[in-house]
Structure formats: structure tokens, C-alpha cells
């Protein structure tokens, strides 16, 4: 699959809008982050297991991880 820099940039911009917004509670941010991650998985064929991700462009994988790590699970304790 051809690398789609424009789509990746759009996902990054959407992520930053959510991340720095005071309009969403953490639970809503988590939901939106999950949606972005699903979009990345579908568009760039990110596999379920990390050890299978060697074919994924590093920029894509780095953004995927950044979004994943931004989720806050302490709200569910």
C-alpha cells in the first residue's frame, strides 16, 4: 500500500485537537482516541499484534502508539 502522508497528517491534527481540548471529559477523549486508532488500523493495515507490525511505516506506528498512550484508564478505577 502506498504511504498516505496526507491522511496521517489529518489523523495527527485530529488527535491534537482532542488532546488539547477542554471540551471533552477523559472518557469522551478515550472514545475519540479509539476511533482514531481504528481509522489508522483500517487505512494502514496495522495488525493486531505488535510483533506483526514490521510492515507498518514507522511514522504510522509511532502516531498509533502516541494515541494509544494518551488514553486514560484511571477514570475506570
Image: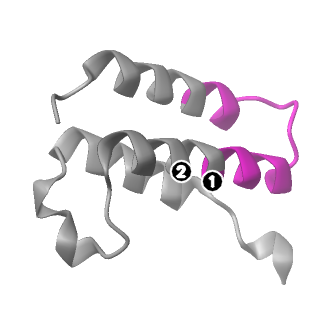
Rendered residue at 76%/74% (across/down): 74
Q: Indicate the quadrant where residue 73 lies.
A: bottom right
In the depicted structure, whether residue 44 falls above or below residue 51: above
Q: Indicate the quadrant where residue 18 lies.
A: top right
Q: Which of marks 2 and 1 is in front?
A: 2
Image spot of residue 25 (x, y percent): 88, 47
Image spot of residue 59 (x, y percent): 22, 39
Is the residue marked by circle 2 packed among few (<14), some (14-19), or many (20+) residues within 10 Å?
some
Query: Residue 29 or 38: which is nearer the viewer?
Result: 38
Quarter of the C terminus within the rendering: bottom right
Rendered residue at 32%/56% (across/down): 46
Q: Is the magenta stretch mostly helix, strand or loop?
A: helix
All told, the count of numbered labels is 2
Q: Distance between the residues labelled 2 and 1?
A: 6 Å
In the depicted structure, whether residue 33 falls above or below residue 76: above
Quarter of the N terminus within the rendering: top left
Please identify the residue farthest to the top as the structure is shown.
6
Residue 25 within the segment the image draws in magenta? yes
Image spot of residue 58 (x, y percent): 17, 46
Q: Are marks 2 and 1 in contact (CB under 8 Å)?
A: yes
Rendered residue at 31%/65% (across/down): 47
SS under mark 2: helix
Which mark identifies residue 34? 1
Query: Residue 1 or 29: which is nearer the viewer?
Result: 1
Rendered residue at 58%/26% (across/down): 14
What residue sits right under mark 2 in the picture? Answer: 38
Please identify the residue farthest to the left as the structure is shown.
54
Please identify the residue farthest to the bottom as the structure is shown.
77
In the depicted structure, whether residue 26 falls above or below residue 76: above
Which mark identifies residue 24? none
- State the extent of the magenta-drawn residues as a range: 16-34
Amino acid at each position: 500500500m502506498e504511504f498516505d502522508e496526507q491522511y496521517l497528517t489529518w489523523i495527527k491534527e485530529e488527535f491534537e485537537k482532542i488532546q488539547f481540548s477542554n471540551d471533552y471529559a477523559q472518557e469522551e477523549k478515550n472514545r475519540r482516541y479509539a476511533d482514531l486508532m481504528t481509522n489508522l488500523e483500517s487505512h494502514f493495515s496495522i495488525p493486531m499484534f505488535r510483533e506483526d507490525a514490521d510492515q507498518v511505516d514507522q511514522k504510522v506506528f509511532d502516531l498509533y502508539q502516541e494515541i494509544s498512550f494518551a488514553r486514560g484508564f484511571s477514570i475506570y478505577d
